[in-house]
Amino acid sequence: MASGDYIPMGTETEYFWYQSRWSLNLIPDPQDTDPIRYAILACLAEELVHAFNWRLSLGMRRDGRHLYRERDEDPYPPYDPETVAPWTKNVPPVDAQWTVDLPADVVDAAGRLVLEEGGVNETFAKRNIVTNVGWLYTI
């Protein structure tokens, strides 16, 4: 992700999706000592929950037994939503002081980490990281 090569992220998301025994709320706390990397990891864990719940809302199932609607006007099938790993709520946003030694092309005027210029994802934004996450929302 930090390299700007997002294609593998979609592949990894697909792989993780079909590991139906891997609950997102059980992703262990990496306790990363690098605060910027820790913030990125927390955001990824949280955004995976949004992406997986989006898939579930469409009728996709992690065990491959997808549910299909016969007509567009049919209701979407119910599902048990994924939940966020508890450790993520304790991960602080990226502090502008942490970015002062980073290359200028990855830090904006507000001191936010810029992984993708023009990024608008709210999960990452709450931790002062600018990026998009379309690569998590593949079907």
Image (tube, rainbow, N blue to C red):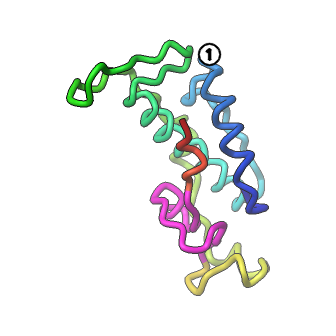
137, above or below 63, in the image: below
| Most common secondary structure along the magenta stretch | loop
Residue lying farthest to the front in this orientation:
71
Question: Dividing the image into 4 quarters, which one contains the N terminus?
Answer: bottom right
Where is residue 115 drawn, in percent x and y? 66, 67
The one of 106 and 38 positioned closer to us in this rendering: 106
Question: Dividing the image into 4 quarters, which one contains the C terminus?
Answer: top right
For image coordinates 49% across by 60% down, the residue present is 121
95, above or below 80, in the image: below
Please check the rendered image and state whether residue 33 is part of the magenta-colored stretch, yes or no. no
Q: Residues within 10 Å of mark 1 (few under 14, many from 20)?
A: few
The one of 40 and 5 positioned closer to us in this rendering: 5
For image coordinates 77% across by 53% down, the residue present is 33
Please state which amino acid type lies under the numbered disc 1. Arg
- Span highlighted in magenta in the image: 112-132
Where is residue 56 drawn, in percent x and y? 43, 27
Where is residue 24 drawn, in percent x and y? 57, 30
Residue lying farthest to the left in this orientation:
73
For image coordinates 71% across by 37% down, the residue present is 12
Give the side of residue 83 with respect to residue 107, left or right: left
- Specify the quadrant of the image occupied by residue 13: top right
Q: Which residue is mark 1?
A: 21
Give the side of residue 28 with respect to residue 86, left or right: right
- Specify the quadrant of the image occupied by residue 130: bottom right
